[in-house]
C-alpha cells in the first residue's frame, strides 16, 4: 500500500512543494519513472528515502500559467518491489490538489486620450482575473510625472473585481502613458503580476492651453488689390491644429466680399493649423479699407479647448466698381483760333491710355497726345476745333476697353463729355448798290 501526500495542496506561481510517498513496508527500485504525472500539471524531482525505503520524498514544481483545481500524482506500483522482491500491483493516487500559477495581466484603456480645460476622463483597467486591493500606488505614469494627471481611487466595476475604473483629471500640460505596476497586484490566489504594464490605449495628452491665431500673419490675402472679376486665396493660421472652424466663425462685416471652400491644408481637411478659403469681392464696389476677422470662440483644439477673442487681417483694397472716366473741357464755347484743355479724370489710376482710345467722331476737332502728372489718375490733352464749323452739340468720348487699371483689368463701354459748342465760322459780307450808274 502507498499513501501520497503534498505538503501544500494549494500551489501558486513561484512555489514548489514536497511530495511524500509513504509505503506500508520498505521498498526498493522506486524512481521517478514509477510516478505518473499525466494529471499532475507539473514535474517531479528524483525521490529519495531517509528510512531505508519506507518513506520517500521528492520536490514537485507546478507548470507555469496553469489554473486547475483537480490535479493528482499517481504511482505505478508494478515498478516497485519490497525487500523480499515482490512487486506491487495497480496504482496509488494522491488526493486532488489545486494549482494556480497563472499570473494576473491587465489591459488599460482611456475613454478620452485628449484632455482639455475642465475635462475629465475614465480609465478602465481590465485584469485577466479578479485581483485584490488594486489601489493608486499600483498605478504609474510613464514618460512624464504625476503632476500631469490627478487620479481618483480605483473602484471595481461590479462584483467580479476583474474590471476597475478610475476618474482622471488634467493637472498640467503633458503627454504620458498610464501603467500598472503588476508586481504589486495579486490575484485571489496571491499570484503577483510580472512587470509594469502599459497598453496602446493608455496614452493621455493633456492640453490646458487655448488655441490662438498665429503670432505672425494670422490672416493673409494672396492679392491685396482686387479688381473687377478677380478672386484671391485667404490663408488662416493658428497656433496649433484646430477643428470646428467654419465660415460662420469668420467676420465679413468689413470685408466687402464673400468666402467659399474653407478647408484645412495642413491636416485631413477638417482639422489642422493652416486653413484656406476663396475670397470673392463684392461687385460694383470701391473700398480701400477692408479687413477679415476670426471669432476664435468658435474653434477648438484637439483637446477640446475653445479659443477666446478675435483677430483681424491687414487692410486690402476692393476696386470692382468698373473703370469710369469724367471728361471735361476748360472752355465749352470755342471760337475761331481758340484751343482748350481736355481733362480725362479716371476713377482709378490707368495705364495704356493714348489718343487712339479717344473717339472724336462727334468732336469736330483734333486732340493732342494725353499726358498724366499724377501716375495715371488724371490725363490732359489739347483740343483744337475744326475750322469753319458752327455746332452746339459736340462730344469727346473714350473707349474704356482700351484702358487698364493697375491690376491689369480693362474697362468696358465708353465715357463721354457733356456737349460743348464750336463756332469757328468767320463772318463774311455781301455789298450791293441800289443804282450802280449815278449821274
Image: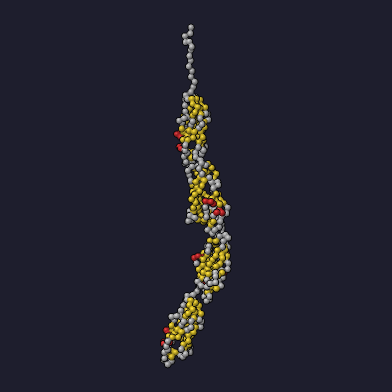
The count of marks equals 0
- Location of residue 390 with respect to 270 vertically, above or below: above
Given residues 158 and 200, the one toward you in this image is 158
Q: Is residue 43 above or below residue 436?
A: below
> x, y (%) of residue 320?
50, 42
Q: Residue furthest top?
A: 439
| Residue in the foreground of this view, choosing between 55 and 156 | 156
Q: Quadrant of residue 31?
A: bottom left
Q: Is residue 79 above or below residue 413?
A: below
Q: Residue 330: image x %, image y %? A: 53, 30
Q: Residue at x 46, y 91 (%)?
A: 25
Q: Is residue 199 above or below residue 275?
A: below
Look at 54% across and 54% down and name the residue there.
299
Which residue ends up furthest to the front in the rendered image? 158
**Residue reaching furthest to the bottom:** 84
Taking the image as drawn, is residue 281 in sight? yes
Judging from the image, the colouring scheme is secondary structure
Residue 1 percent across, percent down from the top left: 46, 89
Q: Could you tell me if residue 315 is visible in this image?
A: no
Residue 337: percent from the left, percent from the top? 49, 25
Amino acid at each position: 500500500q502507498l499513501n501520497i501526500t503534498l505538503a501544500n495542496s494549494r500551489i501558486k506561481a513561484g512555489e514548489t512543494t514536497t511530495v511524500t510517498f509513504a509505503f506500508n513496508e520498505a521498498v526498493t527500485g522506486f524512481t521517478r519513472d514509477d510516478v505518473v504525472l499525466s494529471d499532475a500539471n507539473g514535474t517531479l524531482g528524483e525521490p529519495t528515502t531517509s528510512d531505508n525505503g519506507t518513506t520517500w520524498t521528492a520536490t514537485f514544481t507546478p507548470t507555469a500559467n496553469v489554473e486547475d483545481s483537480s490535479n493528482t500524482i499517481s504511482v505505478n506500483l508494478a515498478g516497485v518491489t519490497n525487500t523480499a522482491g515482490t512487486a506491487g500491483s495497480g496504482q496509488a493516487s494522491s488526493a486532488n490538489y489545486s494549482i494556480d500559477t497563472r499570473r494576473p495581466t491587465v489591459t488599460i484603456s482611456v475613454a478620452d486620450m485628449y484632455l482639455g480645460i475642465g475635462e475629465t476622463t475614465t480609465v478602465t483597467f481590465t485584469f485577466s482575473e479578479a485581483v485584490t486591493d488594486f489601489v493608486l500606488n499600483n498605478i504609474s505614469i510613464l514618460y512624464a510625472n504625476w503632476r500631469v494627471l490627478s487620479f481618483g481611487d480605483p473602484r471595481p466595476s461590479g462584483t467580479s473585481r476583474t474590471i476597475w475604473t478610475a476618474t482622471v483629471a488634467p493637472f498640467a500640460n503633458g503627454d504620458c502613458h498610464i501603467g500598472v505596476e503588476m508586481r504589486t497586484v495579486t490575484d485571489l490566489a496571491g499570484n503577483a503580476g510580472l512587470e509594469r504594464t502599459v497598453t496602446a490605449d493608455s496614452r493621455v495628452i493633456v492640453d490646458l492651453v487655448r488655441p490662438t491665431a498665429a503670432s505672425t500673419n494670422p490672416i493673409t490675402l494672396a492679392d491685396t488689390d482686387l479688381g473687377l472679376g478677380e478672386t484671391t486665396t485667404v490663408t488662416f493660421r493658428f497656433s496649433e491644429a484646430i477643428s470646428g472652424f467654419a465660415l460662420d466663425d469668420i467676420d465679413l462685416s468689413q470685408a466687402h466680399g464673400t468666402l467659399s471652400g474653407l478647408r484645412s491644408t495642413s491636416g485631413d481637411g477638417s482639422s489642422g493649423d493652416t486653413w484656406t478659403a476663396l475670397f470673392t469681392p463684392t461687385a460694383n464696389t470701391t473700398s480701400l479699407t477692408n479687413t477679415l476677422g476670426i471669432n476664435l470662440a468658435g474653434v477648438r483644439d484637439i483637446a477640446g479647448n475653445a479659443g477666446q477673442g478675435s483677430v483681424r487681417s491687414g487692410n486690402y483694397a476692393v476696386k470692382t466698381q468698373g473703370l469710369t472716366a469724367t471728361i471735361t473741357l476748360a472752355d465749352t464755347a470755342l471760337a475761331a483760333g481758340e484751343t482748350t484743355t481736355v481733362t480725362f479724370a479716371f476713377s482709378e489710376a490707368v495705364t495704356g491710355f493714348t489718343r487712339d482710345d479717344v473717339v472724336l467722331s462727334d468732336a469736330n476737332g483734333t486732340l493732342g497726345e494725353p499726358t498724366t502728372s499724377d501716375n495715371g489718375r488724371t490725363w490732359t490733352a489739347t483740343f483744337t476745333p475744326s475750322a469753319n464749323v458752327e455746332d452746339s452739340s459736340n462730344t469727346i468720348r473714350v473707349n474704356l476697353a482700351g484702358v487698364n487699371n493697375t491690376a491689369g483689368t480693362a474697362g468696358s463701354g465708353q465715357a463721354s463729355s457733356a456737349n460743348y459748342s464750336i463756332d469757328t465760322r468767320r463772318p463774311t459780307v455781301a455789298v450791293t448798290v441800289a443804282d450802280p450808274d449815278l449821274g
